Amino acid sequence: MPALSEDKNTIEKLTNLGKKLLSELKQKESPYFDRPVRSLSNVIFDEKAGTLKLGDRTSRRTFLNIGHARTFMQSVMIAAKCKELVKNERSASIRELYYQLKHTIPGLTDNTLEGQEESNPVIVDLETALDALREYLHLTADRSGQLFGPLTIEDQGDKIDCLRLGKSGLSIPSIVDDYKFLDHDAEFILVVETGAMGDRLVEEKFHIKNKAILVSSGGQPSRGVRRLTHLLHQKLELPVYVFTDGDPWGFYIYSVLKTGSMNLAFESKRLATPSSKFIGMTIEDIEKYGLKKVTEKLKGIPAKKAGGPTEDYKRAIELKNYAWFKHELWQKELDKMLATGMRIEQQALASKKLEFVSDTYLPEKIKNHEFLP
Amino acid sequence: MPALSEDKNTIEKLTNLGKKLLSELKQKESPYFDRPVRSLSNVIFDEKAGTLKLGDRTSRRTFLNIGHARTFMQSVMIAAKCKELVKNERSASIRELYYQLKHTIPGLTDNTLEGQEESNPVIVDLETALDALREYLHLTADRSGQLFGPLTIEDQGDKIDCLRLGKSGLSIPSIVDDYKFLDHDAEFILVVETGAMGDRLVEEKFHIKNKAILVSSGGQPSRGVRRLTHLLHQKLELPVYVFTDGDPWGFYIYSVLKTGSMNLAFESKRLATPSSKFIGMTIEDIEKYGLKKVTEKLKGIPAKKAGGPTEDYKRAIELKNYAWFKHELWQKELDKMLATGMRIEQQALASKKLEFVSDTYLPEKIKNHEFLP
């Protein structure tokens, strides 16, 4: 992979970590490093920034501690490998990293790593300790999602006009930090939950008619989709609208894009887009657009029934209690969902007609600024 | 979506079905239609063609049969909607189709469809009854996979040079029948199981250095990936090599691409590529390339142990018994897997070095024609 603008910074961080450990060794002290505690109790909603972040609590990993020695060794080994990757302008999947580093320690019968379940948490340790996005360490994750729209991207020297990719679209890779956004004629960014809805909007030429950069997420957004949405918003200064199913899982997808996710709270500032707005589907849409026939029932048992709340009901109540869903409009929306016991899918709009979503639903919402915050 | 070359044919088939039903009604007979039985007992391995297909057994769906009336009505309704889609050069996902057709029948309290679990099997009925690929009915499935390589594709009038898409690549849509393959400078087609291995090969510029069309499947290949591989092979007359993990699931992915899948046996002739060859990973590779340290154990219990065989062991024995795995080289490979209890992942090649797969492993296999049939 090509160099990232962060590379110099990342190498400096890794080098400093190494120097620090070395100086401790020279002073015959036990080397250690600190990193923020990642447990939920240390996840904070930063109201001002509008994102999740980690609190101030840190924990120390010390070499001369029988309970830490193995993970300490693994941390140093992985840090060294990441430095090599960054220096050589290479990348590796976290699976490849595991395979690259797994070996028997000379003089011992132990392996450096027994499975990826050992290397994965150490990678996250390093990310938090160094305050470096995993992508800055040149580690890749699974890709998903497509991009369409009036935007030219330079990727590895190739200039890609994303308006000239037919109905296929650009596949969104794991690392997008090296993308250069050359030219664009877009007015907003629309992130769509399901691939099928993305395909619908492309068939209707929504992205062309509305000058929209369409990011089709294909379910729970990958890191690549989240980072790309963040970067597009930041660099092009365009509004971001998020379009999901009208159910607790769709609402949570929105909140992950907007606010960050709890288990990656330390990376929200680079992955989340706090100014995103929610365009639909909402429970209010059901009445407004006459969709009652094509709603589905919330899954699980309501709170007031024996054994409840479970599944969708439980999830909706959890959302209600999150600090970042406290806005009265979201409380109203979630109350309505719980009271009616209904949910509604994006594709249910096809019950009107196929082009209803692109000709009426989305343009009206955008024109009238009908968003949830 | 644009017109497909099959459209005229599809409309004719749908029209003929309608005319047949109408003439039966006029003659005061019960309308009916026949379609091949799809149960496993009617799935045949056609040795000559090298693909799975359905046998001669058919079953009849008759309107004036209390057990058939509802599905008969659904079949006619879906056939009519598909005709409309094809005529209007539109497509719909099978979820949208369901939403488009779900309504209360006038004068009754019944809905036409209660859930997608009612419409999905009727769609497959129509596909088999008409001998029309679902894509010919303009119905889309979920997309997955990416394409890279020295090939220019025309998609909806856009000419896409797939060698100039950076590390992102072309996202493979559900329907590829309208693709025009304009120009190419490729020597073979390589289908890769995991997205991460596809990304590795792109980072190594394997597709450029080896003039390869790289199809990254992202796990079990989607219908789009299977159809695209079939069409690329058929139209460009290039050999197809399939590269999966060395485990029963990887081997089955290969056989789906080569021979077809059992539940879509009626579409093998359009989705499968019988001349495909298997390039790896094999259990033999483990010794040859010194990969023992990075193998994994087969999951489950071997046949000879109490409670066995389960999981990987069970699956490997099932594969051994399939007619299309009867070649002695495959029998040997599966016996070796069962005897050693080992499996090996594509990404384990990273234990040599990251570029080993692209600089040594694949080129050597291709040069020496080391394939499994």
Image (cartoon, coloured by chain):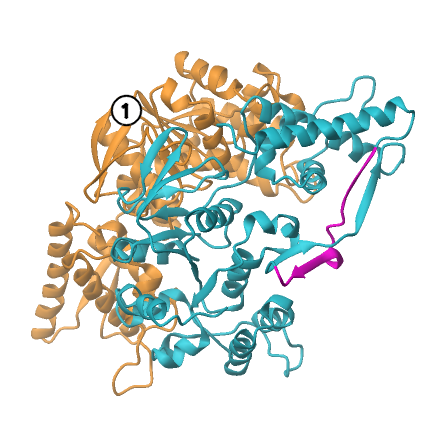
Chain colours: A orange, B cyan
Asked if the stretch drawn in magenta spans residue B39, the answer is: yes
User: What residue occupies the far top of the structure in this picture?
Assistant: A368
Residue A112: image location, x then y, percent? 30, 75
Residue at which label 1 appears: A238
Q: Is residue A59 above or below residue B18?
A: below
Observer able to see residue A160? yes
Q: Tell me which corner region of the image, top left, top right, bottom left or bottom right, holds residue A98.
A: bottom left
Where residue A29 sits in the image (x, y, percent)?
A: 13, 73
Above-or-below relation of B242 to A62:
above
Which residue is the extreme one toward the bottom? A107
Task: Give the letter of the chain under mark 1.
Answer: A
**Nearer to the camera, A223 or B225:** B225
Range covered by the magenta-colored residues: B32-48
Residue A341 visible in the picture = no
- Magenta stretch: residue A267 in it? no
Where residue A305 sits, quadrant-wise, is: top right
